[in-house]
């Protein structure tokens, strides 16, 4: 009986892993199809001709992304030090790259992946799960703040110097997104009871999504365990909020890191001979966040379309050049991060990795 049961369990686990891989591959297939559809709509020959004119200066975009990843992982290190957890920068950087991979290969990874990321951080750095979760949420929030600060400053500068940009429906989506973020942050911090109720309501689908990472993680997201962890989670966040100097330092690191995330677009545009003013590059990358609303890994298709559309509408870049810039930007940021993040996840899974 035991042998049959064990075999059945192994078979179920194997089937689940295969199913998960098929869903990931299918999602990527749909995403790549959308990107190809965008290129086809603009014109294959025209876009490829623009890409073929890329100069060696484009390689600097990969260097810039690497620097961005280093600064963003430094935000994690800063938050860990604030909550009293010390870890080597190499260890944190490896876990951060793995977390980036998990978020980028999962549809709506920014929402689904943090639970798995917290587990990876806890396992490899030796931090309690609650503190790991608080670290991931705090650091990710700080790393996303520059989208709004730099984006807001750039938009204000554009309006004052040029006029109100004609973003059409994108403008409505942007306002709605900003409002939604404000509501979530307010409820999260000021209405904890409401947040707890909402969190427990969505526990079931999150548990299923977390099961794609591991069975133990799915079990750890039960309603009872979630309630127990929220207390320690909020206690850690309060500790972070009381160290204002540390948080300001983390914000500085986040903003510097974001600038190096924006530079690949500026470099890509310059490398094909269609330069974009620096302040417009800032605005384009800030608005590219709208593309992540597309329920595909890393917002594939949506981000490329958003970047190309904003370049055409705001910067006046020809459609073929705008599409080429979007593709080159994503190659040096998204796809590059997926590759190095995947390598890091393999490294952490190895017996001789940091977890050992």
Image: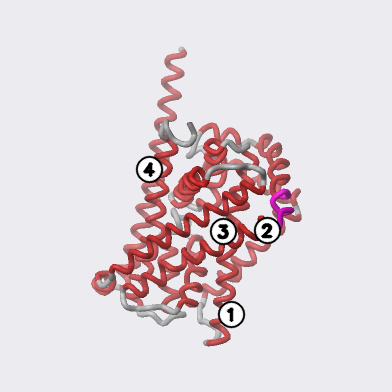
Q: Residue at x 48, y 55 (%)?
A: 70
| Circles 4, 1 touching at the beta carbon (< 8 Å) | no
Label 1 neighbour load within 10 Å: few <14, some 14-19, many 20+: some
- According to the picture, the residue beneath numbered tag 2 turns out to be 185
The CA span between labels 3 and 4 is 31 Å
Q: Report helix, strand or loop for mark 3.
A: helix
The correct choice, above or below, for 172 with respect to 231 in the image is below
Q: Earlier along the polypeptide chain: callout 4 or callout 1?
A: 4
Q: Which mark is residue 156?
A: 1
- According to the picture, the residue beneath numbered tag 3 turns out to be 143
- Asked if residue 122 lies left or right of residue 271, the reply is right
Q: Earlier along the polypeptide chain: callout 3 or callout 1?
A: 3
Label count reads 4
| Circles 2, 4 touching at the beta carbon (< 8 Å) | no
Q: Nearer the viewer, residue 309 or 334?
A: 334
**Residue 240 belongs to magenta span:** yes
Q: Nearer the viewer, mark 2 or mark 4?
A: 2
**Residue 276 belongs to magenta span:** no
Q: Report helix, strand or loop for mark 2.
A: helix
Q: Which residue is drawn at 54% across and 87% down?
A: 161
Q: Which of marks 2 and 3 is in front?
A: 3
- According to the picture, the residue beneath numbered tag 4 turns out to be 22
Q: Earlier along the polypeptide chain: callout 3 or callout 4?
A: 4
The CA span between labels 2 and 4 is 35 Å
Q: Nearer the viewer, mark 3 or mark 1?
A: 3
Q: Report helix, strand or loop for mark 1.
A: helix
Q: Which residue is drawn at 63% across and 62% down?
A: 181
The CA span between labels 2 and 3 is 15 Å
Where residue 62 appears, as percent x and y from the top left, is 37, 60
Q: Earlier along the polypeptide chain: callout 2 or callout 3?
A: 3
Q: Residue 130 appears in which quarter of the rendering? A: top right
* Region in magenta: 238-245
């Amino acid at each position: 009986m035991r042998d049959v049961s064990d075999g059945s369990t192994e078979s179920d686990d194997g089937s689940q892993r295969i199913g998960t891989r098929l869903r990931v591959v299918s999602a990527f297939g749909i995403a790549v199809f959308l990107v190809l559809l965008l290129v086809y709509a603009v014109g294959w020959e025209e876009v490829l001709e623009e890409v073929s004119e890329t100069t060696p200066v484009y390689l600097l975009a990969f260097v810039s992304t690497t620097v961005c990843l280093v600064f963003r992982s430094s935000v994690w290190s800063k938050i860990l030090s604030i909550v009293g957890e010390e870890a080597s920068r190499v260890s944190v950087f490896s876990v951060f790259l793995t977390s980036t991979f998990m978020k980028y290969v999962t549809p709506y990874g920014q929402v689904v992946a943090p639970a798995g990321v917290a587990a990876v951080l806890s396992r490899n750095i030796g931090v309690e799960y609650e503190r790991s979760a608080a670290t991931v949420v705090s650091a990710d929030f700080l790393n996303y703040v520059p989208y709004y600060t730099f984006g807001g400053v750039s938009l204000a500068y554009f309006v004052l110097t040029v006029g109100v940009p004609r973003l059409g429906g994108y403008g409505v989506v942007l306002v709605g997104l900003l409002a939604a973020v404000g509501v979530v942050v307010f409820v999260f911090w000021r209405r904890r009871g409401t947040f707890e109720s909402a969190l427990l309501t969505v526990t079931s689908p999150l548990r299923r999504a977390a099961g794609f990472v591991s069975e133990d993680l799915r079990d750890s997201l039960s309603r009872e365990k979630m309630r127990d962890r929220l207390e320690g989670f909020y206690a850690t966040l309060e500790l972070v909020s009381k160290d204002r100097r540390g948080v300001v330092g983390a914000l500085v690191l986040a903003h510097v890191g974001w600038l190096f995330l924006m530079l690949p677009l500026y470099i890509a545009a310059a490398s094909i001979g269609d330069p974009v003013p620096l302040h417009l590059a800032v605005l384009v990358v800030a608005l590219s966040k709208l593309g992540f609303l597309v329920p595909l890994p890393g917002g594939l298709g949506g981000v490329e379309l958003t970047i190309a559309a904003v370049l055409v509408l705001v910067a006046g870049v020809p459609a073929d050049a705008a599409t080429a810039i979007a593709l080159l930007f994503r190659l040096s940021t998204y796809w590059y991060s997926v590759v190095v993040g995947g390598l890091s996840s393999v490294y952490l899974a190895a017996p001789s990795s940091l977890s050992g």
